Image (cartoon, coloured by chain):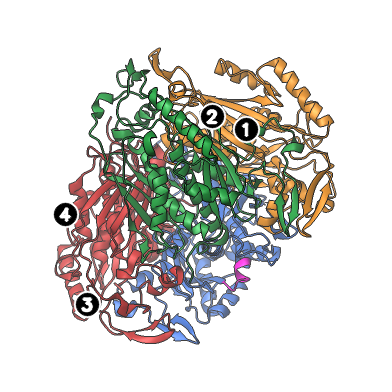
Chain colours: A green, B orange, C blue, D red
Amino acid sequence: MKNSFGNNITVTVFGESHGPGIGAVLDGLAPGIQIDEGSIRSKLSMRRPYGPIGTARREKDEFEFLSGVYSGRTTGTPLTVFIKNKDVSSVDYDSLKNIARPGHSDYTAFCKYHGFSDPRGGGHFSGRLTAAIVAAGAILESALEAKGIMIGTHIKRLAGLEDRDFDDYEKDINKLSSLAFAVLDDEVSVRMQNAIKAAADEGDSVGGVLESAVTGVPAGVGEPFFDTVEGLLSHALFSIPGVKGVSFGGGFSLADAKGSEYNDPFAVKDGKIVTTTNNNGGVNGGITNGMPLLFSVAVKPTPSVYKEQQTVNFEKLENVSLKISGRHDPAIIHRARAVADAMTAIVIADLLTGRFGTDYLGGDR
Amino acid sequence: MKNSFGNNITVTVFGESHGPGIGAVLDGLAPGIQIDEGSIRSKLSMRRPYGPIGTARREKDEFEFLSGVYSGRTTGTPLTVFIKNKDVSSVDYDSLKNIARPGHSDYTAFCKYHGFSDPRGGGHFSGRLTAAIVAAGAILESALEAKGIMIGTHIKRLAGLEDRDFDDYEKDINKLSSLAFAVLDDEVSVRMQNAIKAAADEGDSVGGVLESAVTGVPAGVGEPFFDTVEGLLSHALFSIPGVKGVSFGGGFSLADAKGSEYNDPFAVKDGKIVTTTNNNGGVNGGITNGMPLLFSVAVKPTPSVYKEQQTVNFEKLENVSLKISGRHDPAIIHRARAVADAMTAIVIADLLTGRFGTDYLGGDR
Amino acid sequence: MKNSFGNNITVTVFGESHGPGIGAVLDGLAPGIQIDEGSIRSKLSMRRPYGPIGTARREKDEFEFLSGVYSGRTTGTPLTVFIKNKDVSSVDYDSLKNIARPGHSDYTAFCKYHGFSDPRGGGHFSGRLTAAIVAAGAILESALEAKGIMIGTHIKRLAGLEDRDFDDYEKDINKLSSLAFAVLDDEVSVRMQNAIKAAADEGDSVGGVLESAVTGVPAGVGEPFFDTVEGLLSHALFSIPGVKGVSFGGGFSLADAKGSEYNDPFAVKDGKIVTTTNNNGGVNGGITNGMPLLFSVAVKPTPSVYKEQQTVNFEKLENVSLKISGRHDPAIIHRARAVADAMTAIVIADLLTGRFGTDYLGGDR
Amino acid sequence: MKNSFGNNITVTVFGESHGPGIGAVLDGLAPGIQIDEGSIRSKLSMRRPYGPIGTARREKDEFEFLSGVYSGRTTGTPLTVFIKNKDVSSVDYDSLKNIARPGHSDYTAFCKYHGFSDPRGGGHFSGRLTAAIVAAGAILESALEAKGIMIGTHIKRLAGLEDRDFDDYEKDINKLSSLAFAVLDDEVSVRMQNAIKAAADEGDSVGGVLESAVTGVPAGVGEPFFDTVEGLLSHALFSIPGVKGVSFGGGFSLADAKGSEYNDPFAVKDGKIVTTTNNNGGVNGGITNGMPLLFSVAVKPTPSVYKEQQTVNFEKLENVSLKISGRHDPAIIHRARAVADAMTAIVIADLLTGRFGTDYLGGDR
């Protein structure tokens, strides 16, 4: 399916960094979902470059609906959200023509598209496309929230610094929804931002680890053998440019644990079944167990660094050295958190719609 | 798609642990692929319980083709491989009825299937289904090998012990293909096996981290935005019971690195474009760059431990304590390596078939 | 998807005419559907050669469940039904090797599978595969019936003879369920059977037109733009070997009508909305309107005729003349009716499951 | 997949009749396909209302590419074509609110979307969406033409009048490409246009039968069991509003023939394998046989007639009588021919891309 994802709710993305704009089509939506434009704007602002640590490209990300919205609600037919590209700088891309920027997709895109893809600003491979994902996901985040399902992501680790764990999930998720730089511990937040600035000052960049939580998903959701909660979420999350790892619950860090430590004991608490630990990240056998979903996403350092790099001209098959100029982020992880939330919303909404039918997330009738 | 995976080559799995058997349907295969039954048996033997450290259930895994094979080659129509269940013990499953084994899918399956799923031996959620994956994957591993593509997986980490990195990929993959316990360093191998036995002696279990490599995949394969190499592989790999994390190249461990360290410099070597490091695991922008694919898979400790555990009767909503008996593996990671290889073969074959057409992996004509 | 069909309930077919057997995997079934083996046998008997007018190959079609059934009900995991091939005659297929039987798929299969497909009895292209469809569909027909949805098909036209229209749908469908030769007018039935025998006596064959009705489907089901009720049903029905046309309601015969004649007036009757005619076959804009679905399926005459035919050896590129021997049906339309019912059940169950969720057709809990 | 269609090349449609516009996303395109804007305009003009017999709504159908085109060629990433709605009249839709126009989707859309769908001009169910299909299909028609594959459709039957059969396919298809009203026999063309005008004068409408031919498709294309050429084409063609029947080759009209008459004899002619008749419409066993594809599409009379009709207010559950005003076509069949061509191009391009790989239809490199 290439640029589409989802079985019951399907999202299709299109666009290029310096073309007319970027967009997403959401199909399979319930009719009657309220469109909260303020909430979409708020999510988009979380994805935009932040304060002094961001790229100089500052798009306002003014979205418009090309289809699927009538009188402020979803119609149930395909919803297309479109964001025009405006702040497109006139960098001379010809100077970079056929030069593979290390860590970027210039060379692989050339191998796949034979030189026909749009080279400007990464074309279809630009992180810019994630703005469309964020706008589309924001609609579903609202619809899920109306069902008591909340999603939040913080920067768990950056440049060797660690944020605290989720504690009171709902409270923490609420806090995150108001933060431009998503770190739960305010002091760690300042230090992480300083670390980004320090890297930027060196012409370098940093990556990190995001951690996401989803509360309120009922037990019994997931479609193993293949469409496990983990499989679907990881598939979607790896689409975010720069993501190089996805893990659930204990993930890699608990691979050394014993079974007796890793297993999450079940218990009845207030008449409900819970687990007293959450090493499985809310998923057993690929199906939700009613505990918060908990997963981590490793984001590599932004590949655009200003230091001199060794690389090739892939058409001439020549070694060259390269020094990138232009406007680039020294980190994207704080922006990626909004994309992770959006992707998660799309996957969870897809699973719930399959499980409970096309009207499940729809408006009151 | 639930129990099917793949866009061009599709695998569908079916079966239950203690039902008539387990199977897989491969659709979209090229016609004329040689069926190497010895190779299938060899891969199946790698998935079977090993030596003194395995479960007492010892299935011979005798496979038969129900369709799609004629005169020792694939026909191009759906190939169904079926493995009868034979060594099905007569454990009294009623004693466990409605008791949630921690770390298992009993409770989540109940929430999803309302008590109608086959409770015997984990039913459809048993690791046993992976035998069908291995048999199906083995056919594609042979077809890929004929195209110069090799796949190998070793146990990178187990109980705090680390295997050495891949060095000469092809040589190492060849070595792995002859090992029942897939560790490159022979001494580490012995210590890991001892660690498993030690855990077993305590009635406990261990997990670990697998690392897989794929050589020979041409540059330019992958279908971003969503069907990235990473996204497809992770989706498939998370289907393997017990998998809790998937990462590519540097993954989580390099999240603290700087961009200037993480980026893989390109270079022309012997007239070919290569990268001099492989932190991106052979993938840029979701598309192969011609370097070996390199990824890690975190496998949680087997949930079946013999220590007493706290849990619930989910029908009566009562806390109970549980002591599991029966035949169980103190580790599955050494068996999971065969499944990882098979899943990888299916995904790579799927991508190549989409890219180059349905005859690409087929027999000579 | 090639050999799989359906979005929410997916059926995958496999097998060859003279291989080990034929089968189907149903995925996405609700858990708890009662398996009525008698009903499956009854549907299979409708597909089997009938009385004096059928082929000499007489398979008992003894089905077995390889997966997905426990204690007489669906588990909700993939259900695999398998039918072993038994009455496989030892015809010398080599004499026909590389000879294209006119109207058959020998030549096209050669072009697609390069000579690797199973040549015996048509291989994967044999009508025999429809037995698996019928068995799978029978399970869904029962589940739909429990929801008040009934499906029936009669031979509307054969050799210039016409059966009467549906009159009282439910009564007629009940009558059809007890008929081995599905014609509503008993006298027409005899004449049609005589026409088949007359064609057989000349070494020739006949086709005809089936008409199907489905009652009880609620209004509001269908997924335009592309997954219209008509589009999904026609896609599935054209898979039945020999089908060359599908139309809904008035279809081709009303193409000459005026809009004022074709439009179906709506009316409120007994507090329910109905249409007073049904030229649209129960579908407006690709979505059910609550009236019986009504559609026709054109089945071409069986291509196996005993008269001498002109054709080619496609390997030698030579003209040859051919006289077919062996066991063949002078008509398959009376058998195809069971397949049409089954396909219809699969499509309707798929649509309803998508609309109302995975438990919709499931057993009582 | 609802509003998406295709396995290798996927088209997704969106938009509403009186919303911002309508569009289509083509995914899976080969890179480097030349965009011939003149050809797109020409195809769009064939879909537009014609001369004196058309609706008064006259959209210029100015398309723009929102993505996927760079320097006049496809990039290989999703191509989005968008057509703004301009000539949107200010009809008072409230007067029709909750009134089911017979033959239209008002009532069924209400049942499905619970009153949230866009009611203006049929919303997502308007024939207007087919303009996006035509624009998208035109790109593929050009790409196929470069491979020697030609597609053409004529009005075979209208109001009891019959056009002549295809004779010299390529010559006839060329002629059709220059005709605004697609009838091969010029005299019949005039009579058909007069018949439409006569119906219009009575406030009534007419339907008819289209016949399409595709030449140059190689033998061996098609993916049975389910993704037969017939199944895929019919699925797509039934999406065209008003289509009520699809048949291949002899179709319904030959259902009375004998097998010996229906079978198409094969012969070697000029070193190539052909059939001497084409009752199977170029398809055997769901796979192309190298002969021209030939199929018919029954189009019902336009449901918008100006005569008084009986219907209901579906919210109040009341019988009402209705007299439609506004701008409507007395026939759409001459416009539907452009949509049939486009749908056919999409399906054929999809099949060829799956068969021969993603670069098959791409530009020279």
Q: Position of residue A228 (x, y in %)?
A: 59, 46
Q: Which residue is mark 3?
A: D199
**In contact (CB < 8 Å): disc 4 and disc 2:** no
Q: In terms of depth relative to the viewer, which is nearer, D202 or A192?
A: A192
Chain for numbered disc 2 = B
Residue B174 covered by magenta stretch: no
Chain for numbered disc 1 = A
Q: Position of residue C165 (x, y in %)?
A: 47, 78
Q: Which residue is mark 2?
A: B251
- Amino acid type for the residue under numbered disc 2: Gly
Q: Which residue is mark 4?
A: D178
Chain for numbered disc 3 = D
Please report the bounds of the magenta region as a residue range.
C143-149
Direction from residue B319 to residue C334 in the image, left or right: left
How much space separates mark 4 and mark 3, taking CA atoms? 26 Å
Q: Which residue is mark 1?
A: A252
- Amino acid type for the residue under numbered disc 3: Ala
